Image (tube, helix red, strand yellow):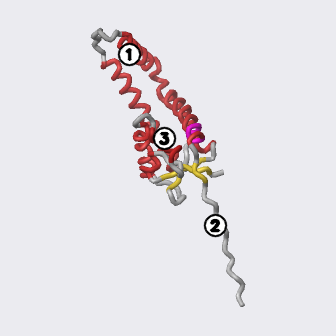
């Protein structure tokens, strides 16, 4: 009589990461991104500072107007600042999230907390999924961040951008 086959126990599935730990990881990533953008824009610091001051002054002027006053906005001042900063911040932000998530499975903020982004079957995400996730972030912000609050409402703790990209954030530790 042959002995029964030895069956390895099934590895436990990683637990989904909750809202607060994901928020903490995002805040760390946000601080890192502020440092990166500041470093990249350092050569233009004086010019950007002047543009920011002009845009803030224009916004204050608009908000100080009474409800019956007609004030003509100088949208060129505001738009120029937003355009310049967006042309710097967006590519850096996209590259940061897409490259870290594709190559390392997590951003530095997520890695600090032992989190990892995976496909639904637990395998690493693809470049296409990382790009889809990043575009899905915009959807998660609308309306009023409800896409992020879905983490609190779904048993798998998936946000809208996770659903769009077919990914999940799990605790690795």
* N-term mark: 1 or 3: 1
Q: Is residue 81 left or right of residue 16?
A: left
Q: Of the two numbered discs 3 and 2 on the same chain, state the one appearing first in sequence.
A: 2
Query: Is residue 84 part of the magenta span, yes or no?
Result: no
30 or 145: which is nearer to us? 145
- State the image quarter where residue 64 is shown: top left
- State the mark number for residue 36: none
**Residue beneath label 2, please?**
10
Q: Are marks 3 and 2 in contact (CB under 8 Å)?
A: no
Residue behind mark 3: 148
Q: Which tag is nearer the camera, tag 3 or tag 2? A: 3
The part of the chain drawn in magenta is 21-25
Residue 164 percent across, percent down from the top left? 42, 49
Secondary element at image label 2: loop
Q: Nearer the viewer, residue 37 or 21?
A: 21
According to the picture, the residue beneath numbered tag 1 turns out to be 59
């Amino acid at each position: 009589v042959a002995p029964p086959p030895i069956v390895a126990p099934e590895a436990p599935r990683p637990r989904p990461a909750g809202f607060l730990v994901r928020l903490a990881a995002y805040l760390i990533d946000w601080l890192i991104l502020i440092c990166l953008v500041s470093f990249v824009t350092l050569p233009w610091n004086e010019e950007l500072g002047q543009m920011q001051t002009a845009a803030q002054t224009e916004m204050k002027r608009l908000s100080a107007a009474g409800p019956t006053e007609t004030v003509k906005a100088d949208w060129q001042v505001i738009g120029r600042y937003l355009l310049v900063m967006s042309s710097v911040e967006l590519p850096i932000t996209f590259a940061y999230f897409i490259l870290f998530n594709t190559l390392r499975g997590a951003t530095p903020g997520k890695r600090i907390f032992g989190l990892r982004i995976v496909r639904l079957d637990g395998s690493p995400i693809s470049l296409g999924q990382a790009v889809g996730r990043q575009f899905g972030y915009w959807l998660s912000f609308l309306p009023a961040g409800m896409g992020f609050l879905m983490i609190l409402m779904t048993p798998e703790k998936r946000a809208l951008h996770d659903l769009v990209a077919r990914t999940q954030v799990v605790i690795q530790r």
